[in-house]
Each structure stands twice: as structure tokens, then as C-alpha cells.
Amino acid sequence: MAQIQSLFLAFTILSLSGPIILAVPSDPRRLVVNLIHQDTIHSPFHGKSEDLATRLERTLQIRRTLPTTDIQADLVPIQNLFFVNFSIGQPPVPQLALMDTGSSLLWLQCQPCHRCSYQNSPIYDSRSSSTYTMLPCSSKYCTYSQPLNCTSSIPCFYNQQYVKGVGSMGNLAQEQLSFRTFDDGLVVVHDVIFGCGFSNGDLQGNKQMNGVFGLGFEPVSLATRLAKFSYCIGNVIDPSYIHNKLFLGDGAGVEGDSTPLKAIDGQYHVLLEGISVGEKKLPIDPNVFEWKGVNTGVIIDSGSVSTWLVKEAYDAIVKEVKSLLDPWLTETFTQKDHVCYRGTINQDLEGFPTMTFLFVGGAELVLDTTSLFFQIKPDEFCLLVRQMIDSDQSVIGLMAQQNYNVAYDINGKKLSFQRIDCELLAD
């Protein structure tokens, strides 16, 4: 599949120690989790030795490697933007997992561990939890390759593989997850399917990371169980921005204009009809956006920073951008495979028209200059739309989704865009 490097949203570690857990009799209607940027001082990815330009360039290069099957995606721990947090078991053990919309399984490093990376927090031990239940290979959730003589007494073995980077093998099980609420209470979700990994890939020195929190559409996913989820990213670049949020559950806020959502090959596909700049609809054949098989169509992705378009669409955008900027600004060629100009976004792009992605059903995703361009240096900015050179698939990245609550209604098979200041979304 297309080369688009990984990015995964992840849960920030919360100290969930304490004797009291406020359990609920059924699945919670709404869970709200704050997303923490990788370069905040509270993040284990924070590079104190990196200057701003180095961090910006690293962020700009983040792309996901798309899977050839649902259980193959790119997972490289050093290239993620956001973190999140939960605890598992009883007594609860704090966990830090990468949140991934491109895969479905939640897996964690588990004791007894045959091959685990070092982590600062204790590795979860299923033998010490009163709420752990191993799933047998006869379980309806056990879709991995199992022995021919499968019985209810044989555990379900999983093997989560990725194109490159971290993988995990272990037993599929059920556990309770604990989330801290905004008013400092705890909400528990019972019997969550997860992979208890006793043989895991190298986490590449990330001592805070415990596993991966998949939010794909397969039955093992918590997102499928809770039916809906959304995220609101107010600022991809600024690590001090504190209002980025993830919402889980039926109350995830599926508002705004919607478009059909299709789950194909482990990816969330959307139906893009066209692109406009200002009032001008660009001359792009809509057929280039259609799904025709593997490595085609358009996906909405939390795992890419830039937006990646097939050649015809990319060429049309670059031609329009250059027609608007070339008479006034000097193009630079310091950034490989980028269209860049000398100047600053705030001053030199004042009055620049918005770019709009036009979807089937009337939904629109409007990009202003802060979502369309990237200040790579104090005196240089670059276009955040890039050409897909190894695939016929287009990817709408995270920068294009800034200032929107992007909501996935899995059962309703629709994706919604609500333009909003993330700070205004109530906890």
C-alpha cells in the first residue's frame, strides 16, 4: 500500500491509583480524553536538544504506511504526534498507548513477558488482575489463524503484524479499562477486547509507550463497540495547545455536515467530488478520486500530517497556488518535494482564498492558510499538499482537519465535519 508514515494519536498517562473506581452499569455514553502533543514538555517524545526548525521538519515528514490488510500498518514509535491515557485491570495499572484509526486491536505489553521492551511504568500482569478473562480460540472475536483442534479450553492466539516497526503476539482477552473524567472521577468500561502481548517488537527506546489503541472498524475495536468516536485537533504544530480532544461513545458529537463513510482494507474511505480555491472549482476529473481497488480512492487519516493527492489533483492545486503567489513572492527550493515561498503566513498570505474539499452529500472541509501552509522556517513557508508518487490513493491529512470535530459514525456509516474551536467542546 501507499507509503504514508505513521502517526497515531495516543492516551496520556493518568495516575489512576486509588481504591475507588466509579463503575457504570453499561457502556458510557460519552468519554472525553485530552490529547497531548508529542513535543510538549510532558511528552516522552519531547526532544530538549531539538530546535523549532528541526521539530517542524520532523513533523512535516510524518506519513503513514498504509496496510495491505487490516492487521498490517506502519507503527514507528518515534514518529507520532499525540498521546492519551487509560488504566487497565483491577487494581488498575496505568497505560500509555498509541491511538490508531488505521488498525482495530488494542494490545499491551503483558507479564509473563517473553519479549518486551523496557518501560518506566510496571508492565501489566494479567495474573494480578481480578477482572482479566482469557478468550478461547472458539470465541467469535478470534479471527486469527488458530489450530485445527480448537476447543473452548485453548486460548485465542493473536499475531498483530505491521509493514515495519512494532508488532505484537500474545493471547486475546477481555479486561476493564478505566478513564479519568474531567471532574476527577473514574469511568470504567468492562470486558474490553485486547491483546495481552507476551512477545512484542522493539519500542525503539520509548520507555513510556505500553502498546497500541486501535480505533478501526473490526469487531475487536472499542470504537466499534461504542459505535462512534471523534477527535478535535485545534493545533497540530503548537505543543502548548491543550484543547485537542478525543471523544468516545454515542455522545461523541456527530454534528455538522456529513458524507458517506466506507471501511475498506482497514482504512476509512470518503467520497471526494472535487476541490475549489476561493470560488473557483479546479478542473479535476472526479474519477481520480473513485475507489477502484487496492491503493485507490480517498481516505481520511489521523496518521498523516500533510494531505497527499494523486498527480492530476496535485498539479491543479499547485498551478492555482503558483498563479496567486508567483507574482508577489519568491519561490524557494530548499525543501525537497515541497512547494515553498519566502515569507510568513501571517503577513504574506493575508487575503489568500480558502481551499475547500467537496464531498458527496454536500459536506465540505474548508482549509484556511494555517491548515493549507506550514511555516517551516521563520522566513519560509510551504504548501501542505503533496503529490502521492507511489499510489493512486489520496489521503486527507491531519493539518487539513484542524479546527474541526471530525466524527466517525461507524454504524451509521457516515463521517461528519463540525468546524469549531476545540476549546468550546464541553467536557
Image (cartoon, helix red, strand yellow):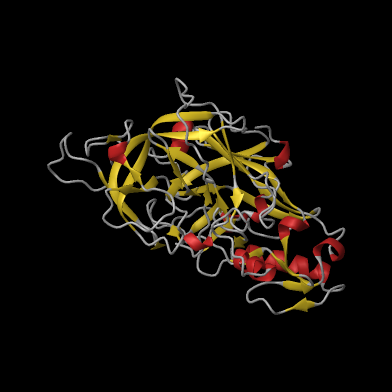
Q: Depth check: 281 or 414 in front?
A: 414
Q: Quadrant location of the C terminus?
A: top right
x, y percentage for residue 383? 71, 66
The residue lying toward the viewer, choosing from 28 and 278, is 28
Q: Is residue 391 visible?
A: yes
- Residue 415, image quadrant: top right
The answer to whether residue 159 is visible is no
Which residue is painted at 46% across and 34% down in the image? 178
Relative to 364, residue 181 above or below: above
* 326 with respect to 102 (left or right): right
| 230 up-or-down from 292: above or below | above
Q: Residue sitting at 82 percent across and 56 percent down?
A: 353
> Outermost residue, top direction?
25
Residue in view at x 49 percent, y 65 percent: 3
Residue 244 quadrant = top right
Residue projecting furthest to the left: 149
Q: Residue furthest front?
A: 18
Image quadrant where residue 221 sits: top left
Residue 286 placement (x, y as % from top left) = 62, 55
Q: Is residue 332 left or right of residue 259?
A: right
Image coordinates for residue 90, horizontal then vertical, percent: 38, 32
Spot occupied by residue 240 in the image (x, y as percentages of width and height): 69, 53
Circle count? 0
Q: Quadrant of the N terminus?
A: bottom left
